[in-house]
Image (cartoon, rainbow, N blue to C red):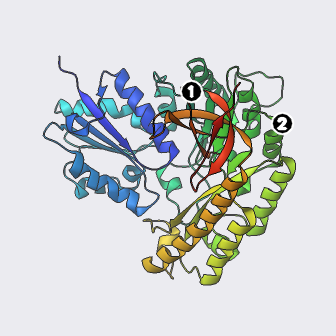
Amino acid sequence: MQETSFYIKAYGCQMNVYDSKNIIEIMECRGFVRTLDPKAADILVFYTCNIRENAARKVFSAIGMLKSSKTKVIAIGGCVAQAEKDEIFKKSSLIDIVFGPHVYHKLPDYIGQILNGEQSKILDIGLEKFNKFEKAQRKNDVLFSEFVTIQEGCDNFCSYCVVPYTRGREYSRAAKDIISDIRYLISNGAKEITLLGQNVNSYDGDAAYINIGTKGNTWKLDRLLYEISGIDGLKRLRYTTSHPKDITVDLMTAHSEIPILVPFAHIPIQSGSDRILKLMNRGHTVAEYLDKLKMFRTICPHMQFSSDFIVGFPTETDEDFEDTVKVVNDVGYVVSYAFKYSRRKDTPASQMDGQISEHEKEGRLRMLQDSLSRHQIHRNNSLIGQVHSVLFDKCGKKENQYIGKNGYMQSVVVECDSNPIGEFRNVLIESSGINSVSGKILQK
């Protein structure tokens, strides 16, 4: 019997990357064979992001480029599917299946129905969060650095964001299931774990069936971090993404008390203007944000931060933008990500007056990125002479060149005769660039 092959392409955030890996495991466990060549695939799966307009457009252009005479089924999943629903079928008659981010465990069955002629088009955008995690398969190809979802969805309803509409309200997985997943990954070779959530520090999980000698069944993120840090074989621990209003003193203290928890957190502010933050419905002021970062560094002196920024939000003035640049200068982020405001359907911000022109957004984005780059270069230069623990995970472009990440998510490049991939090695930083630093591995 001829094998049925599938190709999958994921767009957007780490949550989408994590989901797509789960889809691969589910498909392979059901007998489908993955191929990295879309032209050779019977099935094309696109797992989508709807945060920005360009991300959504890329999906539909990719369908035309990747489809071949061999293609039998095209499936669109993820946040674009959840947001646009049956409108996707109108945009492309080539699409057979549209599935939301909570029902990807059903994809093999839906593909079978299309191939068998039982259905011609399938739409499923249900919110079956429990089933998705329960149906997830154990990974066969465990990496040295792995992601584990602990929380999904968001209750904050920022006025520009589609996440509450595409991923649903906040849901936290049971601590016992998270810890079971991590123990499995560590026992199969993982050394670093990153906990994932749309609002990861709002984690509020049920710790049923776990007894660590403390009272109560509800766990917050700090308690989960302490428990995970005790798993034998785990060498480094991270989490992302955080909302400023949910950062607690207990979480800050965990960073100072857990040796394998990196002194780094991604805490997006989005804008440095209180007026814009209020329009964004962020739930905090600039002063409150900066006070938390200051307290974080008081409790954990080596703490560093990254952030996201949106430029050109409706009614943003030059003064509002300058306030954002001031925050960048005040904090000195290790690395940050800046984006033009993208008008998303059905969000409150999309209906606001005072929409900013693309030309003006592009100009502000360039200026902000220049400021962020200056701080990133300064930060990288400051590392010269320091020794950092680096987990190497890939080869560089040159012979005997290897690349890894330090605790601050910075790329570290070395040249070495022996292959260090999969190992933590101490590296003396000797030079720096905009996006990476270089050095030499110290002898053990």
Q: Is residue 323 left or right of residue 354?
A: right
Image location of residue 214, percent across then percent down = 83, 27
The disc labelled 2 sits on which kind of residue? Glu
The residue located at (53%, 26%) in the rendering is 419
The residue located at (50%, 69%) in the rendering is 341
Q: Is residue 349 visible?
A: yes
The quadrant in which the C terminus is found is: top right
Image location of residue 203, percent across then percent down = 67, 42
Q: Is residue 39 left or right of residue 373?
A: left
Q: Tell me the residue that label 1 is attached to.
A: 422
The residue located at (77%, 21%) in the rendering is 211
Q: Tell me whether the residue at label 2 lies in contact with that at label 1, contact meaning CB atoms closer than 8 angstroms.
A: no
Q: Residue furthest left?
A: 69
Q: Residue furthest right?
A: 298
The quadrant in which the N terminus is found is: top left
Q: Tell me the residue that label 2 is attached to.
A: 257
Tell me: residue 429, above or below residue 337.
Answer: above
Residue in front for this viewpoint, 150 or 68:
68
Q: Secondary structure at mark 1?
A: loop
